[in-house]
Image (cartoon, coloured by chain):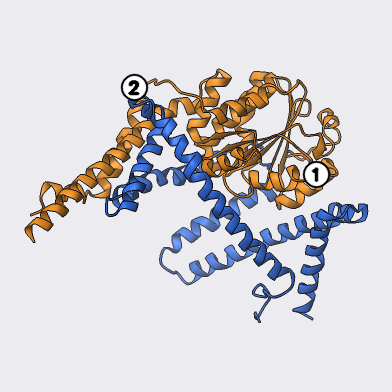
Chain colours: A orange, B blue
Amino acid sequence: MQSIFEKMYQVDRRVIYAILLLAMAMPMFFTLGLPINIDVYVEDAYKVVNELPEGSVIWIGCEYSASQIAEIKPMLQAFARLALQKGHYIYIGSAFADGCTTAHNWLQDIFAETGAVNGENYVIFGYRPSFNSTMEAVRSSVIDAMSDRDHYGNKLSDKPIMQHFEKASDIDLVLVFDSGSPGSDDYIAVWRSQGEVELIVCGATGVELPNQLVKYDAGLLQGVVGGMNGAAQLEKLVGVPGSATKGMDSQGLAHLTIIAFMVIGNIGYLVSKSRNLRSK
Amino acid sequence: MRKTLPLVITFVAGAIMILQSYIQSDFLYNFVQNYLARAVTVSTAWAVGLGAVNVIRVHGRRISNKRPSYFYSMVLLGTFFWFAIVGFVMQKHNSDPFYLFFYDNILLNLSATMYSVLAFYIGSAAYRSFRVRSLDATMLLLTSMIVMLGAVPIGQAIWGGFPTLAAWIGANINTPVLRAMTIGLTLGALTQSMRNLIGIERGHLSGGE
């Protein structure tokens, strides 16, 4: 017969899954509404976009797959909203097959809200395989690198927005949404190291955040927004709460639940271990 | 010739890319921009096609031999061909509402679901593996708890010092370790690239050495 302490460190994983699910679902019925504090690297990311002169050229690299919707979508929307409200031109490209399709999906509301017009305020270049060679080609001519076609198959050279962006050195800021490789490393290696761009801000998944902070500390990135927490902070700075802000309650309760299980497991383990030692 | 030619192409292309970074030459710059970069893009497209053919071959064989769980191979090939038909035959662009209906309701939701399942795996794994078995394991346990609480507003509500402590751990412990790992990995990648460049590594050629 197992003692209660032995049961504490041998909880069935299905029980853990069920309690975790409950904890994450609870905020659907009530909100905690805890204050969100801003990290310095998120504030720097916001300031870089906010303080660019009007009419700046912003390259948005959608280097993520559709599965990262929960973390990337809110920060992509927040940055796009901020950039378009400030009158910047945004150019969206991706080396991931999902990147530009999801950008088209997720930004339609933002384009409608800010009155942005395709070809005048923004352009979506579309998916291009082989990141490094495409980025190398953009260094001399973006229209040639994109084969003069956008995501929808229309000619890029007919669009008025392309007069502001001929080659990589025209870019004022790179906003890269990083989920691994290719990511901010590649933009730093191909463009920044060659002196084409100076400002790079990274929106990363939670898993990638520690890697990006290393580059931020080294001065290679001018700001980092990491995970749903970072996206919630960015939404607070932009002034439009979204899905990330709503998700923080669930994330917080999930963290607490996991920690509670860790504590319970260790209490059970230590007490059982000491009893076994005493009985010997 | 079958083994020598790929090695020569590898060496010449790699040497041009390296020289282009160190020598100011319009010829090299234009050659890389106008030929090499596009050649890589075209060959990557061929590789994607080759991958697609391989997927069809592997799963087609599973279906024809009625291997266990061949039903999932049928689902995979069915959705594979369906999306190909929508794109190539129906000429629906990937911003077309018809295409997006399947993309949003199948691919997007299933991808997000698979990613979300990780949360439960991590919860279960953390419960089982973070045990106070040794000093190292105890430090790992305490660090993980501090970082988890520092990353969410509820942690700050419990104690205002968690975010500061988590940031200190990130800046003073995590960053140096990651830098050391990055340097090591980069040196390893550099060595491997040099081996590929000068033809010592021939595993990618048919028949090996």
- Horizontal and vertical percent for residue A195? 79, 41
**Can residue B110 be seen at all in this image of the molecule?**
no
- Horizontal and vertical percent for residue A40? 55, 28
Chain on which label 1 sits: A
Say which element carries label 1: helix
Could you tell me the amino acid type at mark 2? Answer: Phe
Q: Going 45% across and 69% down the picture, which residue do you hit?
A: B66
**Separation of residues labelled 2 and 1 (CA atoms):** 49 Å
**Relative height, residue A246 to residue B74 (above, below):** above
User: Which quadrant of the figure has residue A143?
Assistant: top right
Could you tell me the amino acid type at mark 1? Answer: Val
Dot 1, crowdedness within 10 Å: few (<14), some or many (≥20)?
Answer: many
Front in this rendered view, residue A50 or A108:
A50
- Horizontal and vertical percent for residue A235? 54, 23
User: Which quadrant of the figure has residue B190?
Assistant: bottom right
Q: Going 43% across and 29% down the picture, which residue do you hit?
A: A247
Q: Going 53% across and 37% down the picture, which residue do you hit?
A: A69
Q: Going 43% across and 36% down the picture, which residue do you hit?
A: B166
Say which element carries label 2: loop
User: Which quadrant of the figure has residue A203?
Assistant: top right
- Let me know if marks 2 and 1 both belong to one chain: yes
Which disc is residue A138 wearing?
Answer: 1
Q: Earlier in the sequence, mark 2 or mark 1?
A: 2
| Marks 2 and 1 in Cβ contact (< 8 Å) | no
- Horizontal and vertical percent for residue B4? 78, 78
Front in this rendered view, residue B197 or A10:
B197
Front in this rendered view, residue B144 or A162:
B144
Number of numbered discs: 2
Which disc is residue A30 wearing?
Answer: 2
Dot 2, crowdedness within 10 Å: few (<14), some or many (≥20)?
Answer: few
**Relative height, residue A181 to residue A100 (above, below):** below
Residue A173 horizontal side relative to residue B171, left or right:
right
